[in-house]
Image: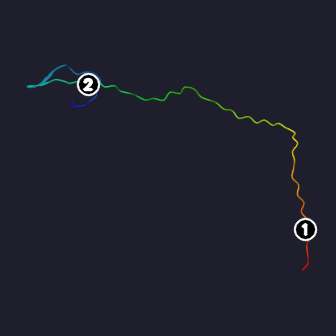
Amino acid sequence: MQRSQIVEKAPEAVRYEGDTIIIPVLKEIAVVEKKILLVEEIRVTKTITHSEQKEEVTLRKEEINIERSET
């Protein structure tokens, strides 16, 4: 088995390969997983409304006099 390898279950406590004794050294690590959770949806519907309203407003008025001279 390789070093720093994630395994599904702990290996046997001690095993032998010929004249070699293999003792696994284990370490538990926390695995954090990030997922997206849809909490709710906001629905916005657009409606068209038409209303008429009367208002009095003051308009500006300008007068222009144009004189042509023949030179």
Residue 60 image offset from top left, x and y in percent: 86, 52
Residue drawn at (48%, 29%), measured in percent from left and top?
36
Q: Name the residue rendered at 26%, 30% in the picture.
A: 5
Q: Position of residue 41 (x, y in %)?
A: 59, 28
**Disc 1 marks which residue?**
66
Q: Quadrant of the N terminus?
A: top left
User: Could you tell whether 8 is left or right of 35 in the image?
Assistant: left
Which one is nearer the viewer's eye here, 39 or 8?
A: 39
Q: Which residue is mark 2?
A: 27
Task: State left or right for residue 55 relative to residue 23.
Answer: right
- In the rendering, which numbered label is found on residue 56? none
| Kind of residue at disc 2 | Lys
Q: Residues within 10 Å of mark 1 (few under 14, many from 20)?
A: few
Q: Which amino acid does the dot numbered 1 rest on?
A: Ile
Q: Position of residue 9 (x, y in %)?
A: 28, 21
Q: Give the vertical position of 18 relative to 54 (above or below).
A: above
Disc on the earlier residue, 2 or 1: 2
- The image quadrant of residue 17 is top left
Kindly state the secondary structure of the residue where label 2 is placed. loop
Q: Residue at x 88, y 55 (%)?
A: 61
Q: Is residue 69 above or below residue 26?
A: below
Residue at mark 2 to residue at mark 1: CA–CA distance: 98 Å
Q: Quadrant of residue 67?
A: bottom right
| Vertical side of 40 occupied by 63: above or below | below
Considering the image in quadrants, where does the C terminus appear? Answer: bottom right
